[in-house]
Image (cartoon, helix red, strand yellow):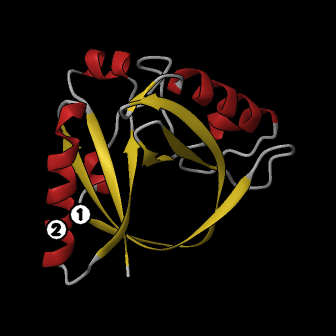
Amino acid sequence: MKLAETTYDNAETGCCARLDPLRWDEKQVTWKDKLFLRDHIRAFLHIPLNFGPVIGRDQSVIEDAEAYPAEPIWLTDEVSPWGSDIYMAVDREVPGQEIVKLSGTFLTKVFEGPYRHVSKWVHAMEDYADRKGHRIEKIYFFYATCPRCAKQFGQNRVVLFGQVE
């Protein structure tokens, strides 16, 4: 299985890997046609209703296609209070799945704490981009651990990816 060849080490929980904040905190990432499998998660007032099943299904098709990139990452686009688009990085086309290409420059910042602080994180991300001389066009969320693993780790880390002009 290709997942074993990635830098993703989930041996501690069998589910989520610990996020290395030094890898993502206050970095600038530029992508040109980076491949992602796009799916949709239903929500009620931004609370995901089927996140786990969607992630599980998508990971299964990615594994079957041996399409894992060296560094697995999934980004969430909060498109409405009723749902989010999820983008899971892949390293090739996945048969039968919607694959999109993301391009652009992104500033990243790591936050820790309960999800109810998302609005504070968004404001802090906008302030960070402003200090760097950028304006954010769109924000994606990398929810790096599920609630069960966050509890086991004793921390809930989320990386915001601010796409800048």
**Circle 2: residue type:** Tyr
Q: What element carries label 1?
A: loop
Disc 1 to disc 2: CB gap under 8 Å: yes
Write the residue at 13% across / 77% down.
Answer: 131
| Mark 1 or mark 2: whose residue is earlier in sequence | 1
> What residue sits right under mark 1 in the picture?
26
- Nearer to us: label 1 or label 2: 2
Rendering quarter of residue 107: bottom left
Residue 53 makes an appearance in the image: yes
Write the residue at 36% across / 32% down.
Answer: 45
The x, y position of residue 137, in whole percent, is 37, 72
Instruction: Look at the picture and state if 90 lies above or below 115.
Output: below
Residue 7 makes an appearance in the image: no
Rendering quarter of residue 54: top right
Q: Pointer 2: residues within 10 angstroms few (<14), some, or many (20+)? A: some
Instruction: Look at the picture and state if 40 lies above or below 114.
Output: below
Q: Pointer 1: residues within 10 angstroms few (<14), some, or many (20+)? A: some
**Circle 1: residue type:** Glu
> What residue sits right under mark 2 in the picture?
128
The x, y position of residue 114, in whole percent, is 19, 30
Q: In this view, does 14 lie to the left or right of 46?
A: right
Instruction: Look at the picture and state if 149 lies above or below 23.
Output: above
